[in-house]
Amino acid sequence: VSKLCAAEKGYFKDDFLQHFVTRKAKRSPLINRGYYSRVAAFDRVVKDFVVNGSNPENYPVDTAKRRKVDPTTQYPASQSSKENNATDKQNGEAELGPLQGDTTTGAPVHKEEKKTDNITRQIVCLGGGFDTTYFRLKSAGFSGFQYIEVDLPDIVNRKAQIIRRTPELQGLSGFEVKEEDSKSKIISELHSSHYHLAACDLRSTQDLDKVMKKCGADFSLPTLFLSECVLIYLKPEYSTGVIKWACEKVSEANGYGRFVTYEQIRCDDPFGITMVRNLESRGCALLGLKAYPTLEAQIKRYKDAGWTKAAASDMNTVYSCLLDPEDRARIEKLELFDEFEEWHLFGAHYALMVGTHVPVDAI
């Protein structure tokens, strides 16, 4: 609902949300801008991966192409945010532009990528819900990748039903409706040559293994894992298990992998405490937040799980340094905006994390 509101206000283009959202609601400029930064950051990462695969050139975290911008120039930091940033520096986190930690991909530049039926890379979306990334990529003309989405059975069934009865979505997915399928009331999976949607419990890596096999996942291909506000709702042993499982998959296949996560951080200051309480009151407990509350803890989490490199940044830095400055200037004119203090606090409590696995022969 919130993404649809931001899209209709012109923050970003998404012609497919209308198929998945049954109601509309008005959101504040603060929420709209927050969803813009979230969508724009993931779009940048995904599109760069689809274009570049395991080639580190032109990646948004490439140190040579980083745009150095002081995030406090337009949005003055609150005292609590400044204290958080100072604490992070004391804990040994280096300021490296958009992402803190190890940001170079270390992937082979000249290594020939494996090709299977014109597929040279794959994206695995974990708990994507009604995300429309695949359809936006295909409609924009991107190709050469396979897209695997997994979520809980009820979500998968609802999404599959919508795809099946919507010609535009059906055509983009490449899914052909058979007569026996048209009579089915419950759908647990959809499969085509480039798109897979399947039910899975992320708390079980054995379940993930079975689903990946059914979807024809090939982890020797460059693989991008996406987790957008998903793992934070699992207990730490389950969420970290997923991160470790993904690393093991690409490591066993000696492939190149990236794991990109967007979720909340910093639960111990007044804003963080209120954020946690508000979500808990709506039945959305952040079960993993206390275990990994800082950027430093998140970086260590990925490295401990086996990822060759790890980097993280809060959304204030992502917004100022990673997103296209011309597009930022465009969206900043869409609505009257005077919630600068709240905006900076909001950005300081959400983060983008990236784990990278480099094949052995590339090190």
Image: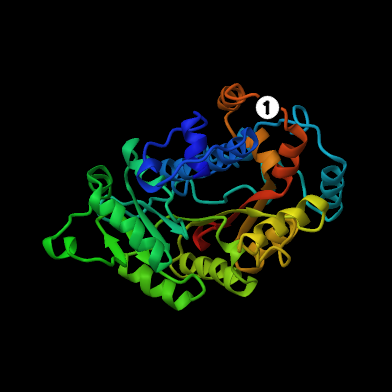
Is disc 1 placed on a helix, strand or loop?
loop
Does residue 336 sit above or below 294 in this rendering? above
Residue type at mark 1: give it. Phe
Q: Quadrant of the C terminus?
A: bottom right
Image coordinates for residue 59, horizontal then vertical, percent: 54, 41
What residue did someone put label 1 on?
A: 337
Viewed as shown, does residue 1 lie left or right of 38? left
Does residue 206 sit above or below 309 in this rendering? below
Give the mark count: 1
Q: Is residue 24 visible?
A: yes
**Foreground residue among 337 and 237:** 337
Q: Residue 50: which quarter of the image?
A: top left
Image coordinates for residue 105, horizontal then vertical, percent: 57, 49
Does residue 73 sit above or below 21 in this rendering? above
Colouring rule applied to residues? rainbow
Question: What crowding class fits label 1: few (fewer than 14 Cα within 10 Å), some (14-19), or many (20 or more)?
Answer: few
Does residue 89 sit above or below 151 in this rendering? above
* Residue at x 39% of width, y 65% of height: 154
**Foreground residue among 140 and 118:** 140
Image coordinates for residue 43, horizontal then vertical, percent: 49, 41
* Residue at x 53% of width, y 43% of height: 2
Q: Is residue 219 visible?
A: no
Image coordinates for residue 207, horizontal then vertical, percent: 42, 75
Question: Looking at the image, which residue sits at the far left?
Answer: 179
* Residue at x 35% of width, y 56% of height: 159
Viewed as shown, does residue 229 lie left or right of 71? left
Viewed as shown, does residue 251 lie left or right of 192? right
